[in-house]
Amino acid sequence: MAKIETPQPVRGTQSLLGEEADRFHAVISAFDRVRRLFGFRRVEVPVIEPTAVFARTIGETTDVVSKEMYSFEDRSGDSITLRPELTAGIARAYISEGWQQHAPLKIATWGAAFRYERPQKGRFRQFHQLDAEILGAGEPAADVEAIGLAAQLLAELGLSERSTLHLNTLGDPETRTKWRDALHAHFSKHRAALSDESQSRLDRNPLRILDSKAHQDWPFADSAPGIDDFLTVEAGQFFEAVTKGLDAAGIAWVREPRLVRGLDYYRHTAFEFVTEELGAQAQLLGGGRYDGLMESLGGPHTPAIGWAAGIERLAMMVDAPASERPDAVIVPLGEAGEQVATKVLASLRSQGIAADMAFRGNMKKRMAKADAAGARFALIIGESEVEAGVAQVKDLQSGEQNAIAFDKLAEALRR
C-alpha cells in the first residue's frame, strides 16, 4: 500500500497554538477595547473583492498589484482578488452600500489579508491586520483622533516606550504637484547613479525614491528638496493644527521629512509608529490622510484618514497573557460518578463557572490533570458521593477538602 504523503502548510502561512495564539488575540482584544473607548464602530467587509477595487486604489503600477496579489477568474469569468489590505474594501463598501449617510463615520475592523511575497520575520503571505478609518471628515481634528487611537492601542499593549511616532505632511494637491516636479528635477540629475528600482520610479513616482531601501540612493534622498519649501499657506496651517492637536493630547512625535505615500490620492498627514526591536521590519503601524481615494473608485469627494497595523508583528512584541485556566476540574470515579459528573459539568458551565472534566486514567492521573490544568478546585464524584448528593471539593492550593451538595457547587466555587 502506497504511503500517504502528509500535507504541509502553504508557504507563508502559519498555525497558532497556546501562547502564540494567546498573544495574537491579546492584540485583538486590546484593539477592541480601545476602539470602543474612541467610539469607532465595528464593521466587517468581504475578503474577496473585484480586482479593479485594488488596481484603482493601490495603483496598477505598484508591486502589490503587479506582483503580489492573489487574483483569479471565478466561474463567471470575473476577475476576483483576495484582499491585500483592508482600506480599499472599506472604501468600496462606503460608496456602494449606503454608508455615506452615516458620515462622518468612525469605523474599525480586523482580518486576514494576502500578498505573494517572500516570507520573513513578522511577514507572511496570509497575514492579519487591524484597521481604523474616519470617513467623511476633513478636519485636522480627525487626524489627531485617528493617531490618538493608535497611540492608545500601543499604550494598552505596553509598547509606548518601545515605539516612536514619525510624522510628515504631504500637503494639498498644489503642494504635492510642485514638490513632485522639484523632486523629479533633482533626481534626474543623478539618474545614472540611482538604483535600478529608483530609476524605474523616477518618471512614474519620484516621491518613492525618498523611502528607497537601496543605500546608493540615500545621499540623493538626503539632499532632495523638502516639502516645506512648497507648502501652500492652507497646507501649512493644516499640518500646524495637527501637530498642536497631538501636543495637546500628550502624544509625542518626531518630524520625518522622508516619510511619503506614493499615490496621488494621499494628502496632508502621513504617519508611522516605528520600533528598533524588529530589525528591518521597523513599522508597527502606519497610515495617513487619503482625501482622493473615494474618487478613484467613482465615488464623491470624501475626505478620510486611516491606519493599519500587522497583528503578527504586534503579537511578537507583547507580553504573553495569563493562560486560560478552568475554575474547576471534575474527577469522576466509576460509572455512576461519570454519569452524574456530566450533569454537574453542564450545570456549572450554564452558571458561568469555567469547568472541565478529567475523564481518563486512575484517580492519581485524573487529579494530576486537574492540577496541570491550573484549576483552583478539583471536584471528586464517586459512588458514595452520588448516593449522598455531594461532591468532594478540594482546594488545590491549600489542600482543604469539603463535601458540598451538587446544587450548591456554583455558589461555593464563586466564594
Image (cartoon, grey):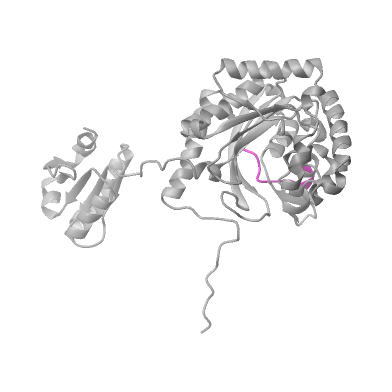
At a point 83% along the width and 29% down the height, the residue shown is 179
Lateral position of residue 386 relative to residue 52, left or right: left
Lateral position of residue 2 relative to residue 202, left or right: left
Q: Nearer the viewer, residue 94 or 376?
A: 376
Lateral position of residue 27 relative to residue 358, left or right: right
Q: Vertical placement of 287 versus 241: above or below?
A: below
Residue 150 position in % (x across, y down)? 57, 29
At a point 79% along the width and 16% down the height, the residue shown is 234
At a point 46% along the width and 48% down the height, the residue shown is 21
Residue 245 position in % (x across, y down)? 62, 16
Residue 383 position in % (x across, y down)? 13, 55
Q: Vertical placement of 225 versus 216: above or below?
A: above
Please say whether residue 43 is visible from this viewpoint. no
Please say whether residue 76 is visible from this viewpoint. yes
Q: Quadrant of the C terminus?
A: top left
Total numbered labels placed on residues in the image: 0
Residue 29 position in % (x across, y down)? 48, 36
Lateral position of residue 383 relative to residue 20, left or right: left
At a point 76% along the width and 57% down the height, the residue shown is 75
Q: Which residues are magenta?
A: 43-53
Q: Furthest-bottom residue in view? A: 1
Is 179 covered by the magenta stretch? no
